[in-house]
Image: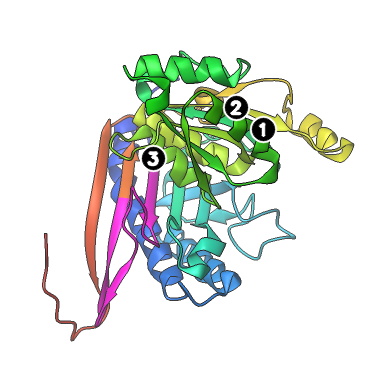
């Protein structure tokens, strides 16, 4: 793929330089809006506020963007629906969004709610069907060494060897669902520990790619659109995702056929996020191990964001103070 872009001839690094901090502004805005409903018990209000803010900010960017992973099909979502066009600028991008990953946990004030987005050049993000996906996410030292088709025990051994530790030193994140009972039993039988989560496998996958979070892999099935977002993050971090789309009925198999999806194929990071240019941003809404949540004070708020560019090879953690009131009085702390 050439480094020159359509519609202006910018090279891959200039695409990321132009948009990486602006993309962080988008997730910050969505997180700030959604945080006003954090803990109030209304997940629809949380999602609506985050989505509206994210769409407004996307329309302010210098992009001609198409939503390929969004809030649903056009007849299911009023905004940020799949196929929606946003922005009116020069950079032609495909966009994957989850304005509030973890609407329920955010509404309840529980950990790991966040706003997340990925941008790439046209065709750089897979348009995945809205179905379940079997997933395996591993940290950079284990990338290219595991296989979703292998038994769980074999992959755990490879992960442990890659990290130069014993299997019983590993912590594996799995969504707390009845369908995962046998997987959980097998992981625990090896001596590895299991961290069960209620929602939010994008942030769980992010945590796998960053040392110091205390988790070493994500296993089990979750949403396929979230798998594409995870792939964008893994690509920037050097981690790996492997996924297999799950067809639950014949109608979904027909959907796969129309979209060119093979339910028997193991899709890897480069299949789900093939772009040579990639910007990924996530801002915490509620507190988590990787990202602090929005912390409000009189007249303003503080946010914590992880934003990355693939071609530029930069990973930024941004701690921002937002003065929402002209009379805000703030003591800045390190």
In this rendering, the answer to whether 185 lies above or below 143 is below
* Residue position marked by numbered label 1 in the rendering: 182
Residue designated by label 3:
207
Whether residues under marks 2 and 1 lie with C-beta atoms below 8 angstroms apart, the answer is: yes
Q: Disc 1, disc 3: CB below 8 Å? A: no
**From mark 2 to mark 1, how far is it between C-alphas?**
6 Å
Q: Which residue is mark 2?
A: 186
Q: Residue at x 81, y 38 (%)?
A: 248
Please state if 281 lies on the left or on the right of 329 as rendered: right
x and y percentages locating residue 304 in the rendered image: 29, 56
Q: Residue at x 75, y 60 (%)?
A: 75
**Mark 1 neighbour density, 10 Å: few (under 14) some (14–19) many (20 or more):** few
Question: Residue 101 versus residue 258: which sits nearer the camera?
Answer: 101
Relative to 193, residue 198 above or below: below
Q: Quadrant of the C terminus?
A: bottom left
Instruction: Give the side of residue 182 with respect to residue 242, left or right.
Output: right
Identify the element where label 1 is drawn: helix
């Amino acid at each position: 793929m050439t480094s020159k872009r359509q519609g202006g001839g910018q090279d891959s690094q200039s695409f990321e330089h132009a948009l990486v901090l602006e993309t962080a502004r988008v997730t910050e805005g969505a997180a700030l809006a959604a945080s006003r409903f954090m803990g109030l018990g209304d997940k629809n209000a949380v999602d609506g506020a985050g989505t509206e803010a994210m769409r407004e900010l996307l329309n302010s960017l210098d992009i001609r963007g198409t939503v390929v992973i969004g809030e649903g099909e056009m007849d299911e979502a009023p905004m940020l629906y799949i196929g929606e066009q946003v922005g009116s600028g020069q950079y032609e991008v495909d966009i994957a969004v989850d304005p509030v990953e973890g609407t329920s946990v955010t509404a309840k004030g529980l950990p790991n709610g966040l706003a997340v987005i990925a941008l790439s050049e046209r065709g750089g993000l897979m348009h995945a069907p809205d179905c379940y996906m079997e997933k395996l996410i591993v940290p950079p030292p284990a990338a290219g060494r595991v296989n979703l088709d292998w038994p769980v025990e074999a992959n755990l051994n490879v992960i442990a060897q890659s990290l130069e530790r014993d299997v019983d030193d590993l912590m594996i994140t799995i969504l707390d669902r009845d369908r995962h009972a046998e997987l959980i039993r097998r992981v625990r039988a090896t001596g590895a520990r299991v961290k069960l989560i209620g929602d939010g496998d994008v942030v769980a996958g992010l945590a796998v790619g960053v040392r110091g979070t205390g988790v070493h892999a994500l296993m089990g099935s979750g949403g396929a659109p979230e798998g594409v977002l995870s792939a964008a993050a893994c690509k920037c971090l050097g981690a790996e995702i492997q996924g297999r789309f799950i067809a639950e009925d014949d109608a979904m198999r027909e959907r796969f056929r129309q979209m060119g999806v093979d339910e028997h194929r193991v899709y890897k990071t480069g299949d789900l996020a093939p772009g040579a240019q990639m910007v990924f941003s996530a801002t915490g809404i509620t507190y988590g191990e990787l990202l602090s949540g929005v912390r409000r004070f009189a007249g303003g708020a503080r946010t914590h964001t992880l934003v990355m560019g693939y071609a530029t090879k930069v990973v930024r953690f941004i701690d921002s103070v937002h003065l929402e009131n002209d009379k805000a009085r703030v003591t800045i702390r390190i």
